Amino acid sequence: MTATEGTRAAVRRADVCAVAVAECFRGDGELLANPIGTIPMIGGRLARASFEPDLAMTDGEAALIANDEASPDPDARVVEHFNPYRHMFDWVWSGRRHIMMGATQVDRYGNQNIAAIGDYGRPRVQLLGYRGAPGNTINDVTSYWVPRHGPKVVCERVDTVCGIGYDRAAALPGDAGRFHEVRRVVTDLCVLDFETSDHRMRLRSVHPGVTVEEVVAATGFDLVVPDAVPTSRRPTDEELQLLRTVIDPDDRRSEEVPER
Amino acid sequence: MTAMRDKRTTEAEAVATLASGMTIGIGGWGARRKPMSVVRELLRSDVDDLTVVSWGGPDVGMLCAAGKVRRLVYAFVSLDSIPLEPHFRSARQSGAIEDEPWDEGLFLLGLQAAAWRVPFLPSRAGLGSDLFRDNPRLRTVTSPYDDAEELVAAPALTLDAAFVHVNRADQAGNAAYLGPDPYFDDLFLQAAPTGRRFVSVERVVPTEDLAKEAPLQALFISRLMVDGVIEAPGGAHPTSCAGDYERDEAFQRRYAASAASPEAWEAFRREWLDLPEAEYQAARARQAPA
C-alpha cells in the first residue's frame, strides 16, 4: 500500500467500483470512452480526470463534453463536439470507442444478453432489445458493468447473444473477429478479465472485504481462479477527493452500490 | 419569391393515405420527439396489421397495446426515464407481435439503403451474434475485392409511409429541429415513397423565418422529402420536443402504469386516446402542474 492510498475505514465499495471502472480505460489514450450507467460514467470521468486525460466523453446525449463532473448542469457543460446519435457509428465502426455496457447475462467467454430472458421467440422477460451490442463488440473494445453479481447474471449460458464473446469471435471465418476485445467485467464484488490462454473468464481481483469464495458462489460457472488473487486497488486520497468534490459530489455512486 | 406549394394537411388526412398491412416508419428516438398526435390518430383509425419500423418508444407501446402491430422492426424499445416499455414487453411476452430485431447500426444502414435505392449496405455489425438466429431477413455478403471478407448485408428498410415530428417547418415541408439531435428523421422520410412522407411540427412558420429560428445546420429536412405538413402543437406529447418542451414524466408514468392490466389500459385509452386531438391537448394542459 502506498502512502497516498486511502485508509480502509474510509473506502467504500462504490468508490472501489468507480476506480475499477476507471482502470478499464487505462492506456486507451485519445479515444471515445463511452461508459453507460451511473458508476461507469463516474469511473470514466475519474480516469479522464487523473491518468487518461486525453479520453473524450459524451454528455449522454448529443455532445462530447470536457467537464470533470459526471452529471454537470446542462448550462455548465463544456461542449467540445457535436455528437448526434448517428455520429456514434462513425466512432464505433472506425474503432475509436471503448464502450462499457450493462449485461443482464454474461457468460464465461464474455457473451452478453440485454435483449430477452428465456426463449427468444416467446420470452419470459422482454428487455430492451439488441440495441447496438452486436456492432459494438465486433468493432471495438467492450467492457461490462454488473452492479449485482449473481449466478443468474454471471451465468453458464446467455439466452440470447447480443454482444459477442471470445468463442463467437474466434469461430468467425478468417480474421473477421480481429477488432473484437472484451477487456473487463467489473461487478460489485470483483473485477473479471479474459487474460487466459483460451479467453475463459478469470478472476482478476476481489474488492476489499470480498472473499474469493463469495465470488465463486455468486458465479454460475467455473471461473478461472489464480492461486493468488489480488485485492482491487483502493482509491488514492487524490481520487477520493476528486470523486467527493468534483466528479460525483451528490454521491450517486453509493445509490447504485450501497454499503453493506 | 415564387410561392412554394402549400402541403399543410391533418393527422386524419395523413392516416387516410394508409392501408392495413403497410410498413410504416416512425421517427424520433425512444421517448423523444415522437409524432404522437399521428400515433393517436392511428389508434382511432381502423388501420391495423402494421409493420412498424421505429427507434421504439411509447409509439410502439401504444400501437402494440391497441393491437395495431403485426410485426415490429426495431433495435430497442424504451421510455428513457422508464428503461423498459411495459406495453411492448407485454406484447412480446404474450406472443402478440412478430419480432424482427436489429442492431442499431444496421438499422441506420437499412434506412440509408432504402433512401439510396440500393438493396443493402455492408457492415461488420451482427457477425457472430444471435441476430442471425432471430432475424432471418439478415444475410451476409462476400466482398468482391481481394480481401473476400464476409460482411453483414443490412437490407434496405423500405417503407410504405413515414411520420416524423420536429419543431418548425414552412408550409412546403422544409423543416428544422431545435433540440440537440436530428435522430434519423430525414432518413425515415427518404425511405418512404412520394405521397406518404409526413412531417408534423410544433409551429408552421414562413420560409424566411426558418433560418432565423434555427441554425442553418438544423434545417435538415427539405420539402423534396415531404408530402404533407401537419401543424401539431404539443404533437410529441408525452415525449420530449427539446427546444419547445421536455418529456411529461408524470403523464408517462400514468401511461406506463396502464400496462398493469387490460382494464387499466382500457381506462387509460378511454380517458386519453378515444378523443379528438384538440380535446386531448386541452385535457393534458389541465393536468399539467401550474
Image (cartoon, grey):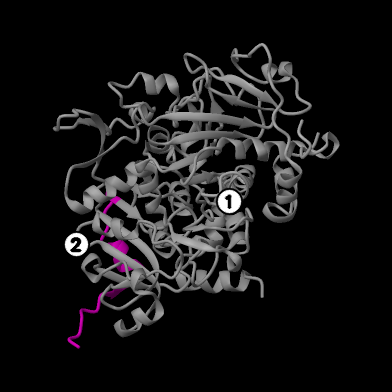
Which residue is depicted at the point 23% across and 44% down?
B156
Badge 1 is on which residue? B256
- A90 sits left or right of A126 in the view: left
x and y, in percent, of residue B269 in the image = 52, 56
Badge 2 is on which residue? B194
Total numbered circles: 2
Which residue is depicted at the point 85% across and 36% down?
A9
Quadrant where the N terminus of chain A is found in the figure: top right
Which residue is depicted at the point 29% across and 78% down?
B171
The kind of secondary structure element at disc 2 is: loop
The kind of secondary structure element at disc 1 is: helix
A220 w.r.t. B63: above or below: above
Dot 2, crowdedness within 10 Å: few (<14), some or many (≥20)? some
Which residue is depicted at the point 53% across and 34% down?
A143
Kind of residue sitting beneath label 2: Thr
B237 w.r.t. A234: above or below: below
A138 w.r.t. A245: above or below: above
Chain of residue at mark 2: B
Residue sitting at the far front: A3
Magenta residues (range):
B1-23
Both labels 2 and 1 in a single chain = yes
Residue B9 highlighted magenta (yes or no): yes
- A128 sits left or right of A37 in the view: left
x and y, in percent, of residue A175 in the image = 30, 24
x and y, in percent, of residue B274 in the image = 48, 62
Q: Could you tell me if residue B200 is visible in this image? A: yes
Give the foreground label among 2 and 1: 2
Give the overall secondary structure of the magenta segment: loop
